[in-house]
Image: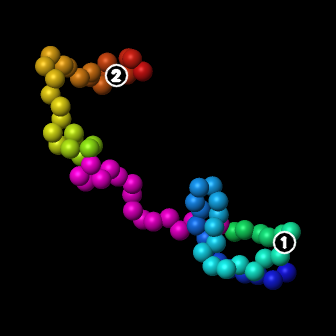
Amino acid sequence: MSQQNCQAIFENGVLRPLTNLQLTEGESVQIIIESASSSKTKSFPKKGLIAQLTSNPIKIDDFQPLTREETNERW
């Protein structure tokens, strides 16, 4: 059994090799996945809608947000 190594990307439910693999039709393969996750944490964009609403919340007359206890009671 010969061994080939390559990097691949998972897009739209398909594992797509980033290099040319030499495989024969019907050949059995073994895949070892090492996730190369980035160290970045996911967050909202700094200038997006969430950031705008957080810095400038919409003010509605006679509106009182629920307290933590009220929220838990409704949950």
On the picture, is 20 further left or further right than 37?
Answer: right
Residue 17, above or below 3: above
Q: Residue furthest bottom?
A: 2
| Residue depicted at 63% across the width and 67% down the height | 16
Badge 2: residue crowd in 10 Å (few <14, some 14–19, many ≥20): few
Q: Residue at x 63, y 79 (%)?
A: 19
Instruction: Tell me where the magenta segment starts and ends, as one range.
Output: 33-48
Residue that appears at 31% across and 18% down: 70
* Image coords of residue 52 (percent x, y): 20, 44
The amino acid pointed to by label 2 is: Thr
Check the image and report above or below for 4 versus 69: below
Q: Nearer the viewer, residue 73 or 16?
A: 16
Tell me the residue that label 2 is attached to. 71
Residue at left offset 27%, top offset 49%: 48
Principal SS element in the magenta part? Answer: loop
**Quarter of the image holding residue 59?**
top left
Q: Is residue 44 above or below residue 57?
A: below
* SS class, disc 1: loop
The dot on residue 25 is: 1
Residue 49, given in percent of the width and then of the height, sits at 26, 44
Asked if residue 41 is among those painted magenta in the image, a careful observer would answer yes
Cα distance in 3D space between marks 1 and 2: 59 Å
Pinpoint residue 74: horizontal percent, then vertical percent.
Answer: 39, 17
Asked if residue 62 lies left or right of residue 74, the reply is left
- Tell me if 39 is positioned left or right of 12 in this view: left
Question: Of 16 and 63, which appears nearest the observer?
Answer: 16
Q: Is residue 28 magenta?
A: no
Question: Residue 4's quadrant in the figure?
Answer: bottom right
* Near-viewer residue (71 or 33): 33
Regarding mark 2 in the picture, which secondary structure is present there?
helix
